[in-house]
Amino acid sequence: MDYGPAPESTKEAQAWLDQHERRFGLFIDNAWTPASDTFASTNPADGKELAQVTQATSSDIDRAVEAARRAQPGWVALGGHGRARVMYALARLLQKHARLFAVLETLDNGKTIRETRDADLPLAARHFYHHAGWAQLQSEEFADYRAVGVVGQIVPWNFPLLMLAWKIAPAMAAGNTIVFKPAEFTSLTALLFAEICKQAGVPAGVVNIVTGDGRVGEAIVNHPGIDKLAFTGSTEVGRIIRQATAGSGKKLSLELGGKSPFIVFEDADLDAAVEGLVDSIWFNQGQVCCAGSRLLVQESIEQRFYTKLRARMDNLRLGSPLDKSMDIGALVDPVQRQRIHGLVESARLEGCTIYQPAACEMPADGSWFPPTLITGASTSAGIAQTEIFGPVLVAMSFRTPGEAVQLANNTVYGLAACIWSESISLALDVAPQIKAGVVWINTANQFDAACGFGGYKESGFGREGGREGMYEYMTPLSEDARPSAPVVEAKGSVKMAEGDSPFAIDRTAKLYIGGKQARPDGAYSRAINGANGQFLADVGEGNRKDIRNAVEAAHKASGWAKATSHNRAQVLYYIAENLAIRADEFAARLAAMTGSKDPQREVQASIERLFYYAAWADKYDGLAHQPPMHGITVALNEPVGVIGIICPNENPLLGFISLVAPALALGNRVVAVPSEAFPLSATDLYQVLDTSDLPGGALNIVTGSADELAKTLASHADVDAVWRHDGSAAGCAEVERLSAASLKRTWVGGAKGRDWFDTKQAGGRAVLAHASQVKNIWIPYGV
């Protein structure tokens, strides 16, 4: 018995293309522009042209942004219910025209009709239904937030319509207007979506769709009228966007590459794991950012699993994507095929073993590549570290769960992971240890609009879907209330105070690294003078090596992240208690440094802020989602890791506490640079920290130049995030620019001030969100 052909008709899709004379302009302000300066969109399965699509110009982008800006106030004024009705209509139209969208997607992208019909279209409609609900509930659930404004969105070619839904739905629900760029290779379903926008009653200017190559994306990224950018694509382009937007104030979310581990333990259901692996790496020809492209198999079952896997590969069917019996379709473009071929051949030259099914015949026309298994690669081999983005699986073995975690995390990426084990205890022990934004247990490639998706490390930052995805398209109202008054400038100078005797009592505050006071590596100090100009003390002039030592100490203090939230809360309460005991001393220091007329207020506010974040430590819980599967998804709020914090000059004690406390409360380790002008409030805390049970290395304090130390932190590969709130516009831009190298998260204040006494500006979930990242763990019930 063999499969018979089951071709899908393209009649309706071809008729739709003919209806437009196979030439498409841009969709701006609910109107089509004339098609001009066009390029071909081709069918990857046979190389034939489908249509001509317009290459947008910079003036086209200007018009699209202007239309979106005009439409945004009215879209917000329509209210949550009004937006929900429009989005509901979009969801219904996607369902009504589901087969047309699915066939057009297959023609344009090359993926199989089974995937577009059964996965992409239902999930795209689900996103509009789900986010119509968020629009309806926005005034209740997000009362302290507003829409960002005009959003620029850029998506890749692997999931053209689904990526559109992931991005446009939450943006619309929150009240934003959109300039959307589909991938150059796969624009047709976005243009069909533009048509149904008019049918659904989307007001003019709310959704604008502009097509073209990378120049169009560049124009969107650099446009001053864009308030937020959402990009899905390669890590390399993500870095460029991070650098281009540094200092612009644009909100940014990046969903980038991956090299996801697929871990099979010896007690797993091996047949089920093989099927999960087929779905993980050969779904969409492996052109999936979260594809399980690194297979990690426990050594005791390695060869048995490989035998089962090769047998399954031999039965995979590759051919016409429009045939419903096919498992693997065409790659999107010959350029992609050539790249994959080059990577596989490089692995062959390195001595790896390459397995490809002998019976897998390639069609004569189009872009095709067979399912491929590579064994014998070292953990550092290029094929094991590079994102291939094709139907290629690299396999290696491990002995213990600890080794599996080490191998899984041995990558610059952190997007997704799969764990296969019949022991739920083992699976749930391993899942939190893997540095990835999504972990699937005994399943693979599960997605839902209610569950956030996004990565760690060089897989980007931000989430799409769920409550956390909505926050990406909103701004806290407290940000609008921030003062625009000039910030306090640093005024320390490196000199000995006049009249100091060499026999005077040493008043040099050291650095605080690993729970101990440490002399600065450079053996330089800077004098800190009081408000009256009198010498108060010297502080160490920290340098690059001091930051290195502090970061190393922070990583050694990893136990702080594993401590219970109750324990972390207790430590913060102890710090507050010990600070209160010495409140008069700290008030006197503040008065001497800053000339404050009411220093007691700042000290008391600092104590209260410590209590505030101690209270949050065991209450900033995750969520349990119930997606349309037989199981649950647990969304965990995890610490970011090691955070570098540049503290403000205004309110030097309260500003320091307001930034350090939330980071510590959620289990992060901190390297803090206190106020450059008034650092003594922070250095006076050393004894408070020593008597408050804070583990050494959880908080490290390095005094010195804010600019120099911020650059070092932003450039450090082992720092996971940098916050800068000293009011330096240039310094904040530099942090964002330098962070692009490792794509670490940033939170900067720009040139605006912040009222550190106002809990809405210096507290709440918005701050805690900067100190955490969401990991979604999918747990199916039973079989």
Image: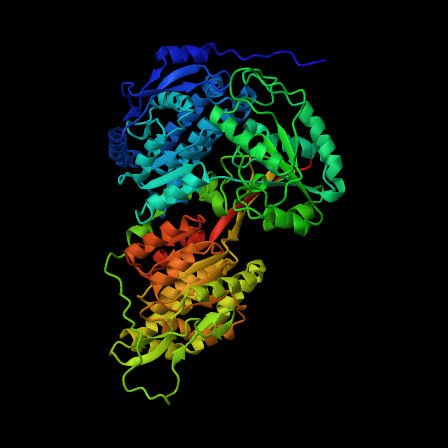
Dividing the picture into quadrants, the one containing residue 77 is: top left
Tell me which residue sits at (29%, 72%) in the image.
492
Tell me which residue sits at (49%, 41%) in the image.
454
Where's the C terminus, which quadrant? top right
Q: Against 91, is 262 above or below?
A: below
Q: Which residue lies furthest to the front in this view?
A: 349
Q: How is the image coloured?
A: rainbow
Where's the N terminus, which quadrant? top right
Dividing the picture into quadrants, the one containing residue 485 is: bottom left
Residue 181 is left or right of residue 643, and the answer is left
Q: Against 744, is 138 above or below?
A: above
Residue 671 placed where, x, y %? Answer: 45, 63
Q: Which of 390 and 84 is in front in this view?
A: 390
Q: Against 604, is 89 above or below?
A: above
Q: Nearer the viewer, residue 135 or 112?
A: 112
Residue 489 placed where, x, y %? Answer: 26, 65
Residue 763 seen: no
Residue 598 placed where, x, y %? Answer: 29, 74
Residue 416 placed where, x, y %? Answer: 55, 41
Tell me which residue sits at (30%, 66%) in the image.
650
Tell me which residue sits at (28%, 31%) in the image.
61
